[in-house]
Image: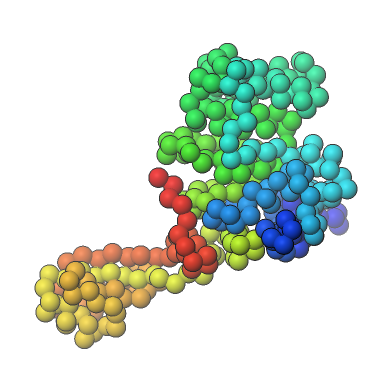
Amino acid sequence: MSPQPPPALAVHQLGKSFGAHTVLDGIDLEVAAGSIFSLLGPNGAGKTTLVRILATLSAPTTGTARVFGHDLLHEADTVRRLIGVTGQYAAVDGVLTGTENLRLTGKLLHLDRAESRTRATELTDRFDLTDAAGRRAATYSGGMRRRLDLAMSLMGRPRIIFLDEPTTGLDPRSRRDLWQVIRRLAADGATIFLTTQYLEEADQLADRIAVLDNGKIVAEGTPAELKRLAPGGHIRLAFGDRDALAAALRVVDGQADPEQLSLQVPSAGHADEVRKLLNRFAELDIAVDQVTVHVPDLDDVFFALTGHPAESAA
């Protein structure tokens, strides 16, 4: 039996301190090759510090990390050949054209001229930048600059791509365009390590999510697994008058809002559960005007784990 290939990323008890201040505290992570992994956390949680360490831009204080089996500290040159990095802010030279930015990146990666030209043409086409390739990057929209920045990180054909809050500052349409790009990269076999504050972004893209708060991983799993960690699922029933609300309270336990003439009943939101509840009211001639089902989402998970809401993606 052939040995199992190493994961794209394996992090064990990784820590980072600046003097007495601990930024990362014993991080354990494993990212499967070809997957999209999202690190979700509020500002100041340590996301960017972790990406800087994994991109060999900063050394950890404690612990180890391996990229496709290669040690981050002792095989740093090999690791750099395997990774691509896109930071929070586009590292694009506005004076240069899109093509010139890409070719400059190729030169820094020691690609020969022919390969740099070929790769630049491939990437401008892939990221829908062909028509703008000869224009100065300073004339690009925010979404175009982001796509160019990501294209630059792919010049060296990396096997794992670190995206540190790549959609920060983008309008909703540009954000969704970039999501499509990320999905295509994963479909082509790349491993994506995505940090974000946006719950919808992690939910839409990630195969697995880890929640980082105050330098610690406080939860990890698939989006569905994480949603099961949070309380708060309920059925909200609205009634036409106080008599109907009072009758409903005699049938089920729940939290009533007399001003809104509503009743909130704890529930996992399963269709059969909702149907049985409505049938019970119908049998007792209790008229329900409106039904709303709320199931726990990543916002509930984030609030339950960190004590505060995440950023809105709007």
Front residue of this view, candidates 266 and 312: 312
Q: Quadrant of the N terminus?
A: bottom right
Q: Residue furthest bottom?
A: 250
Residue 46 locus on image (x, y percent): 63, 55
Residue 26 locus on image (x, y percent): 72, 64
The structure residue drawn at horizontal position 78% and vertical position 54%, both measured from the top left corner, is 60
Residue 73 locus on image (x, y percent): 84, 49
Query: On the picture, is 240 further left or further right than 128?
Result: left
Q: Quadrant of the C terminus?
A: top left
Query: On the picture, is 151 further left or further right than 144?
Result: right
The structure residue drawn at horizontal position 29% and vertical position 83%, both measured from the top left corner, is 253
Examine the rendering and report whether any part of residue 28 can be seen.
Answer: no
Q: Residue furthest front?
A: 19
Above/below status of 63 relative to 48: below
The structure residue drawn at horizontal position 22% and vertical position 74%, both measured from the top left corner, is 257
Above/below status of 185 relative to 261: above
Above/below status of 312 relative to 156: below
Say which quarter of the image contains residue 279.
bottom left
Q: Give the colour scheme shown.
A: rainbow
